[in-house]
Image: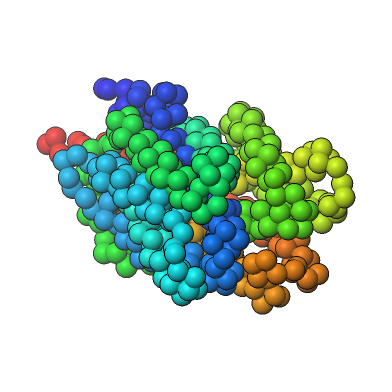
Amino acid sequence: MDADTAPGPGGPAEDPRLVPARMAVFGLGDLTINAVLVSLSMVYISYFLVIVVGLRPELAGAVQLVGRVVDAFTDPAMGRFSDRCNWRWGRRRPFFLLGAIPFGVAFGLLWWSLPSDSQWAMFAYYTLVYVALSVSMTVLSVPYLALQPEMALGYDTRTSLNAWRNAGSILGIFLAIAIRPVAGALGGGPEGYAAAGAVYSVVLALPWLAIHAVTWERPEFQARGEQPPFFKSVRRAARHQSFRRLVGMYLCGRVSMDLMGAMLILYISLYLGRTEDFELTMVLFFSLVLISLPFWLRAAPRMEKSSVFIFGSLWWAASLFFILFLDPSWPDWLIFVIAPAGAIGYAVMDLMPWSMLGEVVDEDDLETGARQEGIYYGLFMFLRKLAGTIAVWLALTLLGALGYAKDAPLNEATLTAIVLLTSVAPASFLLLSAWFARGYPLTRKRHGEILAALSAREAVRAERLGE
């Protein structure tokens, strides 16, 4: 037998092409996607639109909200479309070539400033471009994420692949938080951001050519049972107990990440009055996240993934409460020490849920006989975007209701809200995510049993085809 089909202890052996170099290039996909998502949530919505362009906070939040509502249709629909694709080039990989250029162009257009001062004209333009970006990102990201359980089959191998993907996502965060300095270096102001957007559009599109070159698909997955109708698959996923638990874990974690990401730039710029410290604080934080990934990668084979997730949630939640006690009069070095305290916990919040989703797909395959990575990953990504977007929109709407406006003096209620939205609110969601993770059913042992059953079923199927 070939190495990629020979049975292992719990099912098929890993494909010999799954080597670190290929996994590193695969991680570039998350670099581009996360660079966009983080720049949108951390810089674009709450800083570029509100402070640079002057869009009212509630309208700025609504720009993102409308884009995410569109994702209600595009993410799951893209997942199902890729599940059912029967192209000779594959189900997933062709979309890397089709979506790369629209993805880069839409991101670049998002940073142009309109000559009009009309709030509604600006809202219409940025909303339309944001929707175009969301659709092109969906064309890339859903097939990309759905390819993970096809490239990596084992419980721990998926953690390794996702660790490389997470490393790419953290580098994407560095790229996102660099957009303000890049804009400043290119002239600053609206013109600087437009130039930075043009540079980033090229940087974000090119990696997808390399990702297409190093990835592969398994023909036997494409040959599995007939895909059920779309809405039947969605209902099936909604009733899947393991998926529901995983969604609860992940969404609460992502709300905390997106909420803190959107509020932190306002907290540092407006509450601490140190806008120049934002990028350095983020670099320190995410450098520690990146450094901690190998630690979690070594610890993961000795623990259940849900246990690692609970530890990370509680660690990061505890560190967020320190933000309540930071004072603008404190020296820079002390803030630089305290701010990255939660990085170790943050590192597992995205790593573990995505590596756990592959086991959910395997369990569904065992029960239905169909490989539906696309529908599960599409729903997962849509819910992740929608939950975080609603949280950020509500937070910005609250700031608008409390009287925040560009160039207007800040009142005490607004400053207090910024502090609480950066600390207590995300910490509360992290505690809830840890609660959802208790007693998660898809353990390492259970997944081994699922792989063995799938392998036995495929052996019987192959024997029947050979008769």
Q: Nearer the viewer, residue 319 or 369?
A: 319
Question: Is residue 239 something one can see in this rendering?
Answer: no
- The residue lying at 55 percent from left, 52 percent from top is 189
Look at the picture and state if 224 lies above or below 47.
above
Query: In the picture provided, is 456 more to the left or to the right than 266?
Result: left
Residue 311's x, y, as percent?
A: 69, 44
Point out residue 266 in the picture as x, y percentages from the top left corner.
68, 57
**Coloring scheme used:** rainbow
- In front: 421, or 188? 188
At x 46% / y 59%, what residue is drawn?
A: 113
Q: Residue at horizontal 50%, vertical 73%?
A: 119
- Residue at 75%, 68% in the rendered image: 410
Residue 89: tell me if it is visible. yes
Residue 169 rendering spot, x and y as whole percentages: 51, 40
- Asked if residue 112 lies left or right of residue 78, the reply is right
Kindly indicate the quadrant of the structure image that contains residue 250.
bottom right
| In the image, residue 436 above or below residue 349 | below
Instruction: Please tell me in which quadrant of the rendered image residue 413 appears.
Output: bottom right
Q: Which corner quadrant of the image does residue 227 belong to?
A: bottom left
In the rendered image, the residue lying farthest to the bottom is: 401
Quarter holding the N terminus?
A: top left
Q: Nearer the viewer, residue 55 or 93?
A: 55
**Could you tell me how many numbered marks the image carries?**
0
The percent coordinates of residue 247 (x first, y second) are 52, 58
